[in-house]
Image (cartoon, rainbow, N blue to C red):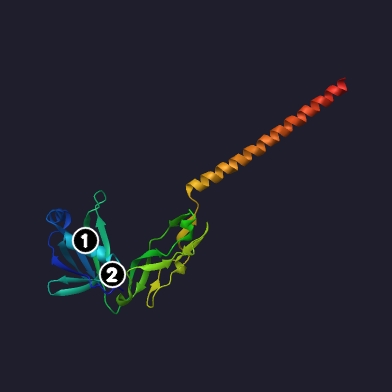
């Protein structure tokens, strides 16, 4: 886990339901803290502070929440954004304990030079994060994957290829592909055109052969008639 300590000061919130739109207009983001079956804490924080913490922590880095005299260690479980303007509307925190394992999403990052890209091929990313389980102290901010083995069409990196640090268990299916090398559309079009050209040439050769045979047959018949 990164040594960076991420903290957020929260305030109690009494406004619920549709009335929270007034909070947003006043520069606050409504949120809730779920805490191991205890009553949830209904809270809020200034928009700029909430956005900053989300950009720093994502859904994988523990956040220290300060609520009056209460302190919580938590992970961001869910964030709701307004779809058109992509503005944050609501945040859900899950309180965690140092001595209990937690499950969360961790982003993936391909590292190193990718020979396939240098060769003009296309590398399709099929997974940009995975589910892991670990104690809070063992959580990581991201997992790096060596992509130098992506060389030819059909080459793949699977979840099983990820090397994780001690204390981290991957929950995502091991055979799930992360990245695959494919042809570009331009290359596929060129191959299709070449294949069509070969088929056309074979067809023309066949027609010419048939016409030649027919002509030869016609000459023989003329000779017989003579």
Label 1: which secondary element: helix
Q: Is residue 172 visible?
A: no
Marks 2/1: CA–CA distance: 14 Å
- Residue at 49%, 46% (x, y): give it: 186
Residue bearing mark 2: 61
Assess disc 2: are there few (<14), some (14-19) or many (≥20) residues with their C-alpha within 10 Å of its C-alpha.
Answer: many
Label at residue 98 = none
Label 2: which secondary element: loop
Q: Earlier in the sequence, mark 2 or mark 1?
A: 1
In front: 45, or 94?
45
Residue 197, image x, y percentages: 60, 40
Q: Is residue 9 left or right of residue 105?
A: left
- Residue at 64%, 38% (x, y): give it: 201
- Residue at 79%, 28% (x, y): give it: 216
Residue bearing mark 1: 51
Number of marks in the rendered image:
2
| Quadrant where the N terminus is found in the figure | bottom left
Question: For residue 20, what is the image quadrant?
Answer: bottom left
Residue 192, image x, y percentages: 55, 44
In front: 52, or 208?
208
Q: Is residue 194 left or right of residue 60?
A: right
Residue 152, image x, y percentages: 52, 58
Q: Is residue 38 left or right of residue 202?
A: left
């Amino acid at each position: 886990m990164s040594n960076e300590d991420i903290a957020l000061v929260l305030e109690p919130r009494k406004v619920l339901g549709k009335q929270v739109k007034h909070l947003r207009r006043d520069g606050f983001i409504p949120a809730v803290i779920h805490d191991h079956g205890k009553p949830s804490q209904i809270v809020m924080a200034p928009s700029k502070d909430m956005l900053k913490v989300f950009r720093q922590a994502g859904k994988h880095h523990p956040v220290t929440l300060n609520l009056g005299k209460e302190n919580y260690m938590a992970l961001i479980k869910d964030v709701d954004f307004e779809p058109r303007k992509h503005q944050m509307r609501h945040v859900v925190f899950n309180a965690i304990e140092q001595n209990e394992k937690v499950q969360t999403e961790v982003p993936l990052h391909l590292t190193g030079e990718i020979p396939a890209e240098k060769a003009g091929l296309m590398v399709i990313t099929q997974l940009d994060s995975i589910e892991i389980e670990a104690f809070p102290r063992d959580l990581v901010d991201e997992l790096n994957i060596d992509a130098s083995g992506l060389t030819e069409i059909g080459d793949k990196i699977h979840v099983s290829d990820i090397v994780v640090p001690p204390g981290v268990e991957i929950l995502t299916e091991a055979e799930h592909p992360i990245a695959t090398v494919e042809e570009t559309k331009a290359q596929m079009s060129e191959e299709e055109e070449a294949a069509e050209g070969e088929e056309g040439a074979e067809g023309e050769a066949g027609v010419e052969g048939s016409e030649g045979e027919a002509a030869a047959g016609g000459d023989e018949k003329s000779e017989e008639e003579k």
